[in-house]
Image: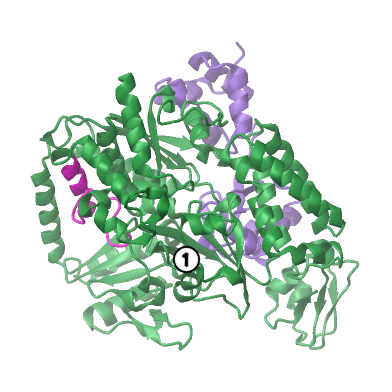
Amino acid sequence: MDQLTINDIDRIKEKWLAEQDKYKAMLMICAGTGCVSAGSMTLYDLFVKELKERGLKNEYLPVPTGCNGFCAKGPIIVIQPEGIFYQKVKEKDIPVIIEQHLKGGKPVESLLYKDTESGEAIPRMDDIGFFGKQMLIALRNRGVINPEAIESAIARNAYKAMGKALTQMSPEDIIKEIKASAIRGRGGGGFPAGIKWESCYEAAKKRNEKPYVVCNGDEGDPGAYMDRSIVEADPHSVIEGMAICARAIGAEKGYVYIRKEYPLALYRLHKAIEDARARRLLGKNIMDTEFTFDINIHQGAGAFVCGESTALMASMEGRVGEPRAKYIHNVEYGYRNKPTVLNNVETLANIPVIIEKGAKWFTSIGTGDVSQNPWNGSSGTKVFSLVGNIVNSGLVEVPMGITLREIIFDIGGGIPNGRKFKAVQTGGPSGGCIPESLLDMPVDFDKLTEAGSMMGSGGMIVMDDHTCMVDIARYFINFLKDESCGKCTPCREGLILLDELLGKIIEGKGEMKDLDIIKQICEAMETGSLCGLGQTAPYPVLSTFKYFREEYIDHIKNKKCPAGKCKALIEFSINDKCTGCAVCAKNCPNEAITGVPKETYSIDQNKCIKCGICEDVCKFEAVTVQ
Amino acid sequence: MSSGNCDVKAVKSIIKKWKNDREYVIEMMQNLQDDFRYVSRDALEVLSHQTGVPLADLYHIATFYKAFSLEPRGKHEIQVCTGTACHVKGAPRLIEAFERELSIKQGETTSDKLFSLEGVRCIGCCSMAPVITIDHDLYGEARPSQVPKLLKKYG
């Protein structure tokens, strides 16, 4: 194929759009991991078949897209250009959608989203609260392109910014623009990307070496999946972001480090790279310029610490992922000891839009005055995975500065099952739990840190009043205990001790003095650990100490778990709502439940193993946990 | 060099696929794990001999990363996601249910080599929490009471 120029990009776009125009409507079928597992690809096949059988295949086009974001409602289908949103679609619904909606012009009421308060059906996606307050930059192409068709991305302006960066901007111009945008690293640290690029550019120039661009897709924070979703929905945005970075710092090789736990993302990224090579958007003399760049993938093998920059590079070199001391900077001596820029998936997905629309536009979104100093605020948007005990669970992209309350209640629809909000956890295992009193806090890098948590990669796990905060603190410590690489003593030993002490409290054997010991260990780890994993590991404990101290005291002094979670401190019993249906007795794995049908059953405490199955199967809320 | 019972040809073809580049030794080991359900000493010896990476380093890798197992895993691999959202929505109870039904602990394989059980870190399907995967099938909003039925499907 001949070398593509920037004009060819426009031609591809026009040709693709003209082809799409032939169709009366497009059926955008979410094919993110969540919807695929709920059967969305079967729905796609069925649409293709049914449309063909009805002789409609030239009128309506089913398109598999990346994650729509509203994962709780999957499988999702959006009919475009009308924007009608169908949720929880089943195979039997396909002929109905075709007959009633596509042919008859009447949306299928039963599949529409229903307002959580009024119960009223909301046909158009844009009118649904979940989507209303969102602002899409990194997720700009979610649900509107086929991630496995490069033309479909090009039709939405993919590679246009790369063309601009190659033909109209010098490397210094690009760095200047990214610096002016004040974009801070979306992977957790919040380091300004422009400063990183500039340092790498200078180090490479000084030592006359070829630097590397590395994309961190080792999304390890439990409860966060925005990077997976971006790669699955719009892999070309990441490739383009990397290429622009490469052009700025003078790199010819780029690498993506991505988790093996994300098979669909891996597949789509491989395909996108191959398609970009075939279109000569990667390779030699890209867009008829001097610029040469290619990307390879390294597949992670399951180690949380590999999200740490130096551990990640060690892993890329085929070694175990152990971090090194931070006085050597990656921008100077990174991958293979060469100057390296490491950016996260979401950061890189933002880059093309900044180049296209300019830094001024980007800084008009967000908090603080970043015109002189990127550390003075947080520009742009952030993607959060809004999960846990929340009605509208899914991926949301919101402008920095939005309040937690707006995210959780306006977008997220609040807490399900009539329960109460208790805390929201951000920042993964390095973050903390934020209580109700801070819900009106604007969300940005610095505000979250002030509250004793952090931005992290954007996991936002909402917890209701049935969540035990001591258990949550123990959960994170246990997680990190398993994931600590063991190289430095404070982290390795500190986590083991914390796990033991918190375990003691959970089992009802805690003493008040344990709280002081825990605090001391936390302080030692914060100051003495080698890398971010150990330094921030105490935050889940310290934040719950700060905001939920009374819960620790309840466990220690009163031997009670107010949330009803800690096994040693709770008892299951059956209340008078019991109808005597015997479902619990049938499902009890230890035959601890007995009774006469149609009368109230009872649990033998000596036999009860507190597995919670009775509570799980009871339809009448007749099982009480005390 | 002893190559024992391992399929030397298969190991060599994996090494060839990655152009014998030692930077990709972790990927080679992932292929071994996928193909043989574990990384055997014999296979690691071949790998070490071919790539020049010391056997001790390969063992370091095999025991450091969660993807690898030094013992054969079961025919069906059950993974219970223990990410935060899954934890909050009941993953510990799911693990207990599997442990009870299979009479093994997490990290173990049943004596008939049919099932392996593992608690894994976030698999990024947090909106469907709690999530389990059995081989390549993903189940969202899983409940402990469904466990016996699920096992029957694969047993």
Where disc 1 sits, the SS reads loop
Is residue A118 or residue B131 the one in the foreground?
A118
Q: Is residue A270 left or right of residue A444?
A: left
Which three-letter amino acid code belongs to the residue tagged 1? Pro
Q: Is residue A73 left or right of residue B100?
A: left
What letter labels the chain drawn in purple? B
- What colour denotes chain A? green
Residue A557 to residue A312: above or below: below
- What's the chain of the residue with tag 1? A
Is residue B128 or residue B109 the one in the foreground?
B128
Q: Quadrant of the C terminus of chain A?
A: bottom right
Q: Residue at x 43, y 83 (%)?
A: A115
Residue B53 to residue A528: above or below: above
Q: Is residue B114 shown to the viewer in this render?
A: no
Q: Where does the magenta region start and end?
A: A142-165
Q: Indicate the position of residue A236 as horizontal and vertical percent values.
A: 29, 47
Q: Indicate the position of residue A292 as horizontal and vertical percent values.
A: 22, 30
Q: Indicate the position of residue B101 as horizontal and vertical percent values.
A: 73, 56
Is residue A335 or residue A26 the one in the foreground?
A335
Residue B130 to residue A301: above or below: below
Residue A163 lies in the magenta-colored region: yes
Q: Residue at x 74, y 50 (%)?
A: A519
